[in-house]
Image (spheres, rainbow, N blue to C red):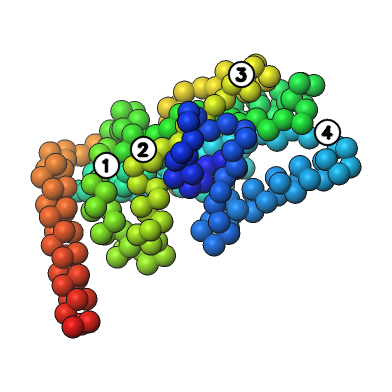
Amino acid sequence: DVDGDAVNQEGVEGPLDESHWNGVGKEEDPVAWARVEAEREAWRLSKLHGIPLTTIVPSTVIGSSMGGEVSESMRVVRDLLFAPWYFPFAPQTSRNLVNVEDVAAAHCAAIDSEAATHQRIIIAGGTYTLSEIGQVIKAKYPSFPVPTRSAWNWITLLVVPLLNTGITRESLRQQLGYGKTYNTSKARQILKLTIQNPDTAIISTVEDLISRGQVIEPEETNHSMVPFMGQLCLLTVLGTGIFIGMKSVSRRV
């Protein structure tokens, strides 16, 4: 698993490659941590017992689901579809996306490739902010109220911890404004893989969610007041945050 804390790329010259590991902590993200530990253990056992091993290391996998479940990665897209129309802003966080079809193709290619033995191979598409994902969806499905602009970071730092007590400002600071890029030369050279534009996977995810009734495509509505309402919401949020902050300070005094 390589799609963890975005700040891990700080100090690294160029894109991340297979020599880099996700440095996420157990308390920060138990699922991502478990994936990393499982892969490390697999490599230890491979070396100990001389077992051939290849690991396919994808970024955030999206696209159509054969099993019908909504994965954690698909929830990124689904949550954008449920955004309120009057607040067209999203936190300036980024995800590197890859089509599930490319990940499946990589597994199949690795089985038949001797050169892939004892290799970690990254499969990654492109890096998108949440608002850029929203722009891709909006171009295909204009009736969905997806956010197409990034909120100012200080607004996100002020508001999100107030709305979700499970998110700290420190964890947000490590994500805002950062975007990871990956070196996928092994996938291209060893597996002869051509990685698709993730735009296709974003739309496939939306189509899959619609077809299974997870989301309902709204009727086209004239939202000409969206820019004004968005600015009004930002001002309201700012005023609320200042008020709460002043109340907190007054209690301490």
Q: Position of residue 131 (x, y in %)?
A: 31, 38
- For disc 4, the marked residue is 52
Q: Classify 10 Å Cα crowding around label 1: few (below 14), some (14-19), many (20 and above).
A: some
Callout 2–callout 1 Cβ contact below 8 Å: yes
Q: Position of residue 89 (x, y in %)?
A: 25, 45
Disc number placed over residue 150 in the picture, else none: 1
| Residue receiving disc 2 | 129
Q: What residue is drawn where x is 64% and y is 54%?
A: 34
Residue 122 occupies which quadrant of the picture? top right
Q: Nearer the viewer, residue 231 or 176?
A: 176
User: Which kind of residue does numbered mark 1 sit on?
Assistant: Ser
Q: Are marks 3 and 4 in contact (CB under 8 Å)?
A: no
Q: Which mark is residue 188?
A: 3
Amino acid tagged 3: Arg
Neighbourhood count class around disc 2 (C-alpha, 10 Å): few under 14, some 14–19, many 20 upward: many
| Disc 3 residue crowd, few under 14, some 14–19, many 20+, Cα 10 Å | some
